Protein backbone atom coordinates (compact mmCIF):
# COMPACT_ATOMS: atom_id res chain seq x y z
CA UNK A 1 0.00 0.00 0.00
CA UNK A 2 1.29 3.46 -0.83
CA UNK A 3 2.59 5.43 2.17
CA UNK A 4 0.38 8.39 1.28
CA UNK A 5 -2.81 6.31 1.35
CA UNK A 6 -5.59 8.11 3.23
CA UNK A 7 -6.49 5.76 6.10
CA UNK A 8 -9.74 7.67 6.62
CA UNK A 9 -10.98 5.97 3.46
CA UNK A 10 -10.91 2.64 5.30
CA UNK A 11 -13.21 4.06 7.95
CA UNK A 12 -15.62 5.21 5.26
CA UNK A 13 -15.62 1.81 3.59
CA UNK A 14 -16.06 0.05 6.94
CA UNK A 15 -19.15 2.12 7.78
CA UNK A 16 -20.52 1.84 4.23
CA UNK A 17 -20.34 -1.95 4.47
CA UNK A 18 -22.21 -1.81 7.77
CA UNK A 19 -24.86 0.71 6.77
CA UNK A 20 -25.22 -0.16 3.03
CA UNK A 21 -26.27 3.49 2.55
CA UNK A 22 -24.38 6.67 1.66
CA UNK A 23 -26.90 8.76 3.63
CA UNK A 24 -26.62 6.74 6.85
CA UNK A 25 -22.84 6.54 6.52
CA UNK A 26 -22.67 10.33 6.24
CA UNK A 27 -24.80 10.73 9.37
CA UNK A 28 -22.66 8.32 11.38
CA UNK A 29 -19.41 9.95 10.34
CA UNK A 30 -20.72 13.52 10.44
CA UNK A 31 -19.93 14.08 6.77
CA UNK A 32 -21.96 15.13 3.75
CA UNK A 33 -23.32 12.64 1.24
CA UNK A 34 -21.10 14.15 -1.44
CA UNK A 35 -18.03 13.60 0.75
CA UNK A 36 -18.96 9.95 1.27
CA UNK A 37 -19.65 9.49 -2.45
CA UNK A 38 -16.30 11.07 -3.28
CA UNK A 39 -14.52 8.76 -0.82
CA UNK A 40 -16.23 5.74 -2.35
CA UNK A 41 -15.18 6.93 -5.81
CA UNK A 42 -11.54 7.16 -4.67
CA UNK A 43 -11.71 3.68 -3.12
CA UNK A 44 -13.13 2.23 -6.31
CA UNK A 45 -10.30 3.75 -8.31
CA UNK A 46 -7.62 2.56 -5.89
CA UNK A 47 -8.95 -0.98 -5.59
CA UNK A 48 -10.20 -1.24 -9.17
CA UNK A 49 -13.51 -2.66 -7.99
CA UNK A 50 -17.06 -1.25 -7.65
CA UNK A 51 -17.09 -2.39 -3.97
CA UNK A 52 -20.80 -1.55 -3.51
CA UNK A 53 -23.48 -1.69 -6.19
CA UNK A 54 -27.10 -0.59 -6.07
CA UNK A 55 -29.78 -3.23 -5.48
CA UNK A 56 -33.43 -3.22 -4.32
CA UNK A 57 -32.16 -3.73 -0.74
CA UNK A 58 -29.74 -0.78 -0.95
CA UNK A 59 -26.02 -1.02 -1.60
CA UNK A 60 -24.80 -4.60 -2.00
CA UNK A 61 -21.11 -5.50 -1.55
CA UNK A 62 -19.08 -7.11 -4.30
CA UNK A 63 -17.11 -10.31 -3.50
CA UNK A 64 -14.00 -8.20 -2.87
CA UNK A 65 -15.89 -5.98 -0.42
CA UNK A 66 -17.22 -9.05 1.42
CA UNK A 67 -13.65 -10.34 1.69
CA UNK A 68 -12.43 -6.97 3.01
CA UNK A 69 -15.23 -6.46 5.56
CA UNK A 70 -13.82 -8.55 8.47
CA UNK A 71 -10.31 -7.20 7.79
CA UNK A 72 -11.58 -3.62 7.98
CA UNK A 73 -13.50 -4.39 11.18
CA UNK A 74 -10.31 -5.67 12.82
CA UNK A 75 -8.33 -2.63 11.63
CA UNK A 76 -10.92 -0.24 13.05
CA UNK A 77 -11.12 -2.15 16.35
CA UNK A 78 -7.32 -2.21 16.63
CA UNK A 79 -7.15 1.52 15.92
CA UNK A 80 -9.74 2.21 18.62
CA UNK A 81 -7.76 0.08 21.05
CA UNK A 82 -4.64 2.15 20.31
CA UNK A 83 -6.32 5.39 21.35
CA UNK A 84 -8.36 3.98 24.24
CA UNK A 85 -7.08 4.77 27.72
CA UNK A 86 -5.34 1.64 28.99
CA UNK A 87 -6.21 0.27 32.40
CA UNK A 88 -5.47 -2.80 34.47
CA UNK A 89 -8.02 -5.17 32.90
CA UNK A 90 -6.64 -8.70 32.97
CA UNK A 91 -8.99 -11.43 31.68
CA UNK A 92 -7.19 -14.12 33.66
CA UNK A 93 -8.04 -12.45 37.00
CA UNK A 94 -11.06 -10.34 36.04
CA UNK A 95 -14.42 -10.82 37.72
CA UNK A 96 -17.14 -9.70 35.34
CA UNK A 97 -20.55 -10.72 34.02
CA UNK A 98 -22.02 -10.15 30.57
CA UNK A 99 -25.49 -10.79 29.23
CA UNK A 100 -25.53 -11.36 25.49
CA UNK A 101 -28.53 -11.47 23.20
CA UNK A 102 -28.47 -13.73 20.15
CA UNK A 103 -30.69 -15.96 18.03
CA UNK A 104 -30.48 -19.64 18.95
CA UNK A 105 -28.68 -20.39 15.68
CA UNK A 106 -25.49 -18.92 17.21
CA UNK A 107 -25.52 -21.13 20.32
CA UNK A 108 -23.73 -24.20 19.00
CA UNK A 109 -21.38 -22.93 16.26
CA UNK A 110 -20.32 -19.71 18.04
CA UNK A 111 -21.08 -19.65 21.75
CA UNK A 112 -20.30 -23.26 22.64
CA UNK A 113 -16.61 -22.94 21.62
CA UNK A 114 -16.50 -19.37 22.99
CA UNK A 115 -17.69 -20.46 26.44
CA UNK A 116 -15.20 -23.34 26.46
CA UNK A 117 -12.45 -20.85 25.61
CA UNK A 118 -13.52 -18.37 28.30
CA UNK A 119 -13.47 -21.13 30.91
CA UNK A 120 -9.77 -21.59 30.16
CA UNK A 121 -8.54 -17.99 29.73
CA UNK A 122 -11.03 -16.01 31.87
CA UNK A 123 -12.55 -18.25 34.57
CA UNK A 124 -13.94 -15.25 36.47
CA UNK A 125 -16.00 -13.99 33.54
CA UNK A 126 -19.62 -15.17 33.48
CA UNK A 127 -21.67 -15.09 30.27
CA UNK A 128 -25.46 -15.22 30.29
CA UNK A 129 -27.16 -15.88 26.94
CA UNK A 130 -30.62 -14.59 26.09
CA UNK A 131 -32.45 -15.66 22.96
CA UNK A 132 -33.37 -12.53 21.01
CA UNK A 133 -34.47 -11.42 17.59
CA UNK A 134 -33.53 -8.11 15.99
CA UNK A 135 -36.03 -5.67 17.53
CA UNK A 136 -36.04 -7.37 20.92
CA UNK A 137 -32.24 -7.20 21.17
CA UNK A 138 -32.24 -3.45 20.56
CA UNK A 139 -34.94 -2.89 23.19
CA UNK A 140 -32.96 -4.91 25.74
CA UNK A 141 -29.82 -2.88 25.06
CA UNK A 142 -31.84 0.32 25.50
CA UNK A 143 -33.08 -0.85 28.90
CA UNK A 144 -29.67 -2.16 30.05
CA UNK A 145 -30.96 -5.73 30.27
CA UNK A 146 -28.23 -7.04 27.98
CA UNK A 147 -24.72 -5.75 27.37
CA UNK A 148 -24.44 -6.57 23.68
CA UNK A 149 -26.14 -8.59 20.98
CA UNK A 150 -25.27 -10.34 17.76
CA UNK A 151 -27.48 -11.02 14.77
CA UNK A 152 -29.01 -9.54 11.66
CA UNK A 153 -29.96 -5.87 12.15
CA UNK A 154 -31.38 -3.69 9.38
CA UNK A 155 -31.16 -0.39 11.22
CA UNK A 156 -29.87 0.59 14.63
CA UNK A 157 -30.37 3.82 16.61
CA UNK A 158 -27.49 6.34 16.52
CA UNK A 159 -26.54 5.63 20.15
CA UNK A 160 -25.84 1.96 19.36
CA UNK A 161 -22.43 1.02 17.98
CA UNK A 162 -22.08 -1.92 15.63
CA UNK A 163 -19.36 -3.86 13.88
CA UNK A 164 -19.49 -6.51 11.19
CA UNK A 165 -19.10 -10.07 12.52
CA UNK A 166 -19.55 -12.39 9.54
CA UNK A 167 -21.83 -13.11 6.61
CA UNK A 168 -24.16 -16.10 6.59
CA UNK A 169 -26.06 -17.77 3.75
CA UNK A 170 -29.05 -20.08 3.51
CA UNK A 171 -28.61 -23.82 2.93
CA UNK A 172 -31.00 -26.76 3.01
CA UNK A 173 -30.45 -29.41 5.70
CA UNK A 174 -31.87 -32.96 5.54
CA UNK A 175 -30.92 -36.57 6.31
CA UNK A 176 -28.23 -38.10 4.10
CA UNK A 177 -30.62 -40.65 2.56
CA UNK A 178 -33.39 -38.12 1.96
CA UNK A 179 -35.17 -38.56 -1.43
CA UNK A 180 -34.48 -34.88 -2.13
CA UNK A 181 -30.84 -35.82 -2.73
CA UNK A 182 -31.64 -38.36 -5.41
CA UNK A 183 -31.24 -35.63 -8.04
CA UNK A 184 -27.75 -34.82 -6.75
CA UNK A 185 -26.11 -32.28 -4.48
CA UNK A 186 -27.89 -29.30 -6.05
CA UNK A 187 -31.67 -29.90 -6.01
CA UNK A 188 -33.89 -27.32 -7.67
CA UNK A 189 -36.21 -25.01 -5.74
CA UNK A 190 -39.39 -26.85 -6.72
CA UNK A 191 -37.98 -30.05 -5.24
CA UNK A 192 -37.00 -28.29 -2.01
CA UNK A 193 -40.46 -26.76 -1.71
CA UNK A 194 -42.19 -30.08 -2.40
CA UNK A 195 -41.31 -31.30 1.11
CA UNK A 196 -42.63 -30.09 4.45
CA UNK A 197 -40.25 -27.76 6.29
CA UNK A 198 -39.05 -27.41 9.85
CA UNK A 199 -38.68 -23.80 11.04
CA UNK A 200 -36.72 -22.48 14.02
CA UNK A 201 -37.75 -19.01 15.18
CA UNK A 202 -36.62 -17.33 18.40
CA UNK A 203 -40.03 -15.62 18.63
CA UNK A 204 -42.05 -18.73 17.77
CA UNK A 205 -43.30 -17.22 14.50
CA UNK A 206 -44.38 -19.66 11.81
CA UNK A 207 -42.39 -17.66 9.30
CA UNK A 208 -38.68 -16.92 9.19
CA UNK A 209 -36.30 -14.83 7.07
CA UNK A 210 -36.28 -17.44 4.32
CA UNK A 211 -40.04 -17.04 3.89
CA UNK A 212 -39.57 -13.36 3.13
CA UNK A 213 -37.00 -14.34 0.49
CA UNK A 214 -39.40 -16.85 -1.04
CA UNK A 215 -42.16 -14.24 -1.14
CA UNK A 216 -39.90 -11.92 -3.13
CA UNK A 217 -39.55 -14.73 -5.69
CA UNK A 218 -43.28 -15.47 -5.76
CA UNK A 219 -42.93 -18.76 -3.89
CA UNK A 220 -43.94 -20.24 -0.55
CA UNK A 221 -43.26 -23.38 1.46
CA UNK A 222 -45.28 -25.78 3.59
CA UNK A 223 -44.27 -25.59 7.27
CA UNK A 224 -44.91 -28.71 9.33
CA UNK A 225 -43.45 -27.58 12.65
CA UNK A 226 -42.01 -24.48 14.31
CA UNK A 227 -39.49 -24.63 17.15
CA UNK A 228 -37.91 -21.92 19.29
CA UNK A 229 -34.54 -23.69 19.54
CA UNK A 230 -32.39 -26.14 17.60
CA UNK A 231 -32.28 -28.73 20.41
CA UNK A 232 -34.30 -31.47 18.68
CA UNK A 233 -33.72 -30.42 15.07
CA UNK A 234 -31.24 -33.24 14.26
CA UNK A 235 -33.55 -35.95 15.60
CA UNK A 236 -36.57 -34.59 13.74
CA UNK A 237 -34.68 -34.41 10.45
CA UNK A 238 -33.06 -37.82 10.89
CA UNK A 239 -36.37 -39.57 11.49
CA UNK A 240 -38.58 -37.97 8.86
CA UNK A 241 -38.72 -36.46 5.38
CA UNK A 242 -38.77 -32.97 6.90
CA UNK A 243 -36.17 -30.53 5.67
CA UNK A 244 -34.94 -27.25 7.08
CA UNK A 245 -33.50 -24.13 5.52
CA UNK A 246 -31.04 -22.64 7.99
CA UNK A 247 -27.88 -20.56 7.93
CA UNK A 248 -24.79 -22.44 6.81
CA UNK A 249 -22.86 -22.30 10.11
CA UNK A 250 -25.62 -23.99 12.06
CA UNK A 251 -26.21 -26.51 9.28
CA UNK A 252 -22.50 -27.31 9.04
CA UNK A 253 -22.36 -27.92 12.80
CA UNK A 254 -25.17 -30.50 12.61
CA UNK A 255 -23.93 -32.07 9.36
CA UNK A 256 -20.52 -32.73 10.92
CA UNK A 257 -22.05 -34.51 13.93
CA UNK A 258 -25.07 -36.32 12.50
CA UNK A 259 -26.03 -38.23 9.35
CA UNK A 260 -27.25 -35.00 7.78
CA UNK A 261 -26.38 -33.25 4.52
CA UNK A 262 -26.53 -29.58 3.59
CA UNK A 263 -27.09 -28.46 0.01
CA UNK A 264 -27.25 -24.99 -1.55
CA UNK A 265 -30.56 -23.18 -1.84
CA UNK A 266 -30.92 -22.32 -5.56
CA UNK A 267 -31.91 -18.67 -5.09
CA UNK A 268 -29.82 -15.66 -5.98
CA UNK A 269 -30.07 -13.75 -2.70
CA UNK A 270 -27.52 -11.69 -0.78
CA UNK A 271 -25.93 -13.21 2.30
CA UNK A 272 -27.12 -12.36 5.79
CA UNK A 273 -24.74 -9.80 7.31
CA UNK A 274 -24.43 -10.42 11.06
CA UNK A 275 -23.30 -7.58 13.32
CA UNK A 276 -22.27 -7.20 16.92
CA UNK A 277 -24.08 -4.26 18.59
CA UNK A 278 -23.76 -2.50 21.96
CA UNK A 279 -24.64 0.82 23.58
CA UNK A 280 -22.18 3.58 22.75
CA UNK A 281 -21.62 4.38 26.43
CA UNK A 282 -19.74 1.06 26.72
CA UNK A 283 -17.43 1.70 23.78
CA UNK A 284 -14.39 2.53 25.95
CA UNK A 285 -15.04 -0.03 28.69
CA UNK A 286 -12.02 -2.36 28.64
CA UNK A 287 -13.80 -5.50 29.83
CA UNK A 288 -16.61 -4.93 27.33
CA UNK A 289 -14.11 -4.31 24.52
CA UNK A 290 -12.33 -7.54 25.42
CA UNK A 291 -15.46 -9.71 25.33
CA UNK A 292 -16.40 -8.12 22.00
CA UNK A 293 -13.02 -9.05 20.59
CA UNK A 294 -13.44 -12.64 21.78
CA UNK A 295 -16.86 -12.97 20.14
CA UNK A 296 -15.58 -11.51 16.88
CA UNK A 297 -12.65 -13.89 16.95
CA UNK A 298 -14.94 -16.92 17.10
CA UNK A 299 -17.21 -15.43 14.46
CA UNK A 300 -14.27 -15.16 12.06
CA UNK A 301 -13.23 -18.81 12.46
Image (cartoon, helix red, strand yellow):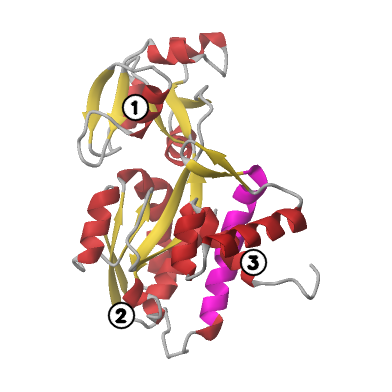
Q: Is residue 130 magenta?
A: no
Q: Is residue 64 magenta?
A: yes
Measured from the top left, where is residue 203 in percent x and y? 21, 40
Mark earlier in primary sequence (1, 3): 3
Q: Which residue is mark 3?
A: 9
Query: What's the CA distance linking mark 1 and mark 3?
Result: 37 Å
Q: Quadrant of the N terminus?
A: bottom right
What crowding class fits label 2: few (fewer than 14 Cα within 10 Å), some (14-19), or many (20 or more)?
some
Is tag 1's residue or tag 2's residue first in the polypeptide sequence?
Answer: 2
Residue 115: x and y, percent? 37, 60
Mark seen at residue 211: 1
Instruction: Decide which of 245, 214 is in the foreground and name it.
Output: 214
Q: Is residue 73 left or right of residue 138?
A: right
Q: Is residue 77 above or below residue 209?
A: below
Q: Which numbered tag is attached to residue 95?
A: 2
Question: At x 34% / y 57%, what residue is drawn?
Answer: 156
Q: CA distance from mark 3 to mark 2?
A: 38 Å
Q: Which residues are magenta?
A: 62-81
Mark 2 or mark 3, which is nearer the start of the sequence? 3
Amino acid sequence: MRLNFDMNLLTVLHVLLEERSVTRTGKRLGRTQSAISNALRRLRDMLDDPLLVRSPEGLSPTPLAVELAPILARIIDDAQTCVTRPDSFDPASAQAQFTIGAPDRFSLPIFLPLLEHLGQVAPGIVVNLRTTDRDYAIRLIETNEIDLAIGWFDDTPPYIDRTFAFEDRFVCLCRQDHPLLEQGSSPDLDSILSYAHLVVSSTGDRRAAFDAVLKQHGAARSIAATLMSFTIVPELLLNSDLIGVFTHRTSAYFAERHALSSVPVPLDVPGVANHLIWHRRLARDQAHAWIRSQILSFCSQ
